[in-house]
Every structure is written in structure tokens, then in C-alpha cells.
């Protein structure tokens, strides 16, 4: 276990737990900094915590999380091997879309987490994560399932959000198909 990484991520988690950079600190029950393997090859980044995440402090623990777990199992991965977080670390009221000011308030935490973990692939789950990390790239409907090397020299894979696939059955097949590309991408990177 890399103690330097663990300590650095612990420092960020502590900062998040005391954060008051935006008004979400008033309505949150718990912060949701993220969790998983600090040596992960893959970081999954969603939009924001939902009600169950706000109650538990664990990312992707509701219905969308169960679908994410199912997709991870389909490619022989589990949560122990990846790191999962969100662009926002607190739940927006009524699960509304994140405001630009809220994303900006959390951005430094997310960028620092990525820098510390230093994954081989960053999977943007949904349009908000993609727009936050790849603002000039376009729409997720055009880019889902395509590996993008960004100006920061990191590799990004935009995918539809699991919650979107649960609400729109047509996206489910697309997301499952795109998800199956992850092992092949990792294999190519590791060669």
C-alpha cells in the first residue's frame, strides 16, 4: 500500500468533509469523496451523489451503482480494483443537475484525486462528468465509447451514465456494449 497516496487522498477527504465552498454544504447529510483502489488503472467519475449516497457516504450505492457493479463483473472487475467518485462531492437537492458554480467548487478535489491515483483510463459516466473533464470535446451522444487522449495527456472514455440507461432502455445496450471495450483498451495500454 502506497502510504503517500493514501495520506494525500485522506487529506482531500478531510478537506471535502469540512468544505463550505458552495451552498450544498448546507443540505448535505454526508460528503461523498469517492472510494476504491488507490492504485487503480481505472477511475470512474459520475455526476453527483444521490439520496442513498448522501445517506451512506458511498458513491454509486443506489440502483445506478448496482448496475455499475453488474457491468464491472461483466468485464471481470469489481470495486476493489477501481476507484469511483463524482464531479460533485455533495448531493444537489432533489437530485437536480449540478450547477456550474458547484462543479467549479469541487473541481480542485477531483483533479487532485486523479493526479494522486494516476489512472491509465478515466471513465466519464454521463454528460456532466464528460463536460467537466472534456469541455471542448462535444456531446456524449457523439463520443460515447470512444477513447480520447486529452491535452492533459490522460486517456478518457466517455460513457452514458448508468442511471440514464436505467431510465432509457435503449441506452442500456449501448452502455453495456461500450463497457465491454474497457478490457481491450487496458490490454493495448499495457502492451
Image: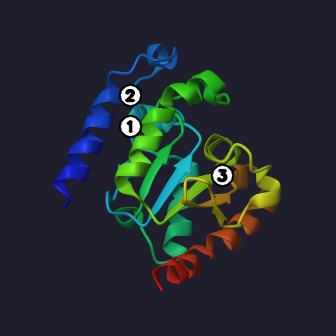
Circle 3 crowding by C-alpha within 10 Å: few under 14, some 14–19, many from 20 = many
Element under label 2? loop
Evaluate if marks 3 and 2 touch, with contact meaning CB atoms under 8 Å apart: no
Evaluate if marks 2 and 1 touch, with contact meaning CB atoms under 8 Å apart: yes
Question: Which residue is at a point 71% across and 67% down the rendered structure image?
Answer: 146
* Residue 99 seen in this snapshot: no
Judge whether 109 appears above or below 129 on screen: above
Q: Place residue 128 in its image quadrant.
A: top right
Q: Earlier in the sequence, mark 3 or mark 2?
A: 2
Percent of width and height locating residue 125: 62, 52
Percent of width and height locating residue 13: 31, 36
Q: Give the tally of numbered discs.
A: 3
Q: Nearer the viewer, residue 164 or 146?
A: 146
Q: Nearer the viewer, residue 143 or 167?
A: 143
Color scheme of the displayed model: rainbow
Specify the label residue 188 is tagged with.
none
Specify the label residue 56 is tagged with.
1
For mark 2, what is the residue? 30
Specify the label residue 161 is tagged with.
3
| Distance from Cα at disc 3 to Cα at disc 2 | 22 Å
Q: Earlier in the sequence, mark 2 or mark 1?
A: 2
* Residue 177 seen in this snapshot: yes
Amino acid at each position: 500500500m502506497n502510504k503517500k497516496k493514501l495520506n494525500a487522498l485522506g487529506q482531500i477527504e478531510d478537506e471535502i468533509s469540512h468544505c463550505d465552498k458552495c451552498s450544498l454544504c448546507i443540505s448535505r447529510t454526508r460528503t461523498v469523496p469517492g472510494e476504491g483502489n488507490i492504485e487503480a488503472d481505472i477511475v470512474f467519475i459520475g455526476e453527483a451523489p444521490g439520496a442513498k449516497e448522501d445517506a451512506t457516504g458511498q458513491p454509486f450505492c443506489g440502483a445506478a451503482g448496482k448496475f455499475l457493479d453488474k457491468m464491472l463483473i461483466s468485464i471481470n472487475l469489481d470495486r476493489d480494483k477501481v476507484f469511483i467518485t463524482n464531479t460533485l462531492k455533495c448531493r444537489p437537492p432533489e437530485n437536480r443537475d449540478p450547477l456550474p458554480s458547484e462543479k467549479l467548487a469541487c473541481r480542485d478535489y477531483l483533479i487532485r484525486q486523479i493526479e494522486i491515483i494516476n489512472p491509465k483510463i478515466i471513465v466519464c459516466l454521463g454528460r456532466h462528468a464528460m463536460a467537466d473533464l472534456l469541455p471542448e470535446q462535444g456531446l456524449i451522444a457523439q463520443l460515447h465509447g470512444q477513447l480520447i487522449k486529452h491535452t492533459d495527456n490522460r486517456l478518457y472514455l466517455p460513457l452514458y451514465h448508468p442511471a440514464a440507461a436505467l431510465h432509457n432502455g435503449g441506452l442500456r445496450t449501448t452502455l453495456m456494449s461500450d463497457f465491454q471495450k474497457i478490457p481491450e483498451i487496458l490490454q493495448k495500454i499495457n502492451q
